[in-house]
Amino acid sequence: MTKIYGTVSPEVREALTGLAFIQGLADGTFPLNTMARTLGYDIAEAESGRVVVTATPHEGLLNPAGTVHGGFAGALLDSCMGLALQTLLEKGFGQTTLEFKVSLLRAITPETGPIKAEGKVLTSGRRIGTAEGRITDAAGRLLAHGTTTCLIFEA
């Protein structure tokens, strides 16, 4: 299936629960954001409180040391954690990252092959939500992990 990239209008987003919106991104009903095209990631799974983002690291992501830039792992974790939180929100609500922390445990290179970033919600309140994320390779080895705190707001 050919992926479509772009944005979804505020009117459409606000008419859907967070879960319906994120599942629409995952199944191609809605376009993925343009950052997904830039970094080459996809939303592979979306369920209540959990989102999986997948990518295959490539040479266009390398830092001067020849490994994938840590910002790539940070972007994948920020995406999967924030999207996981979004799946718990009711119609008319959104969220945005207030802060996130990333720990890089193993070098990621193009030879790493496909990777998976899984975000899971820890807490979701009226104004603040927290989530954790883990990036693993095909063998299940932990490459990076992180946590986020997000502001929940009425759109």
Image (cartoon, grey):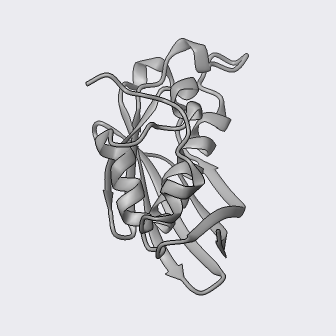
Which one is in front, 79 or 61? 79
Query: Image quarter for residue 152?
Result: bottom right
Q: Is residue 69 visible?
A: yes
Picture residue at 39% right of the left edge, 45% below the top: 25
Picture residue at 61% right of the left edge, 42% below the top: 75
Picture residue at 65% right of the left edge, 36% below the top: 70
Left or right side of 32 for 137: left
User: In which quadrant will I find the C terminus?
Assistant: bottom right
- Residue 101: percent from left, percent from top: 68, 58
Picture residue at 46% right of the left edge, 71% below the top: 121
User: In which quadrant will I find the N terminus?
Assistant: top left
- Residue 107: percent from left, percent from top: 55, 32
Q: How many marks?
A: 0
Left or right side of 45 for 85: right
- Residue 22: percent from left, percent from top: 41, 55
Q: Residue furthest front?
A: 11
Above or below, comparing residue 4 to residue 60 in the picture = below
Left or right side of 144 for 16: left
Which one is in front, 20 or 12? 12
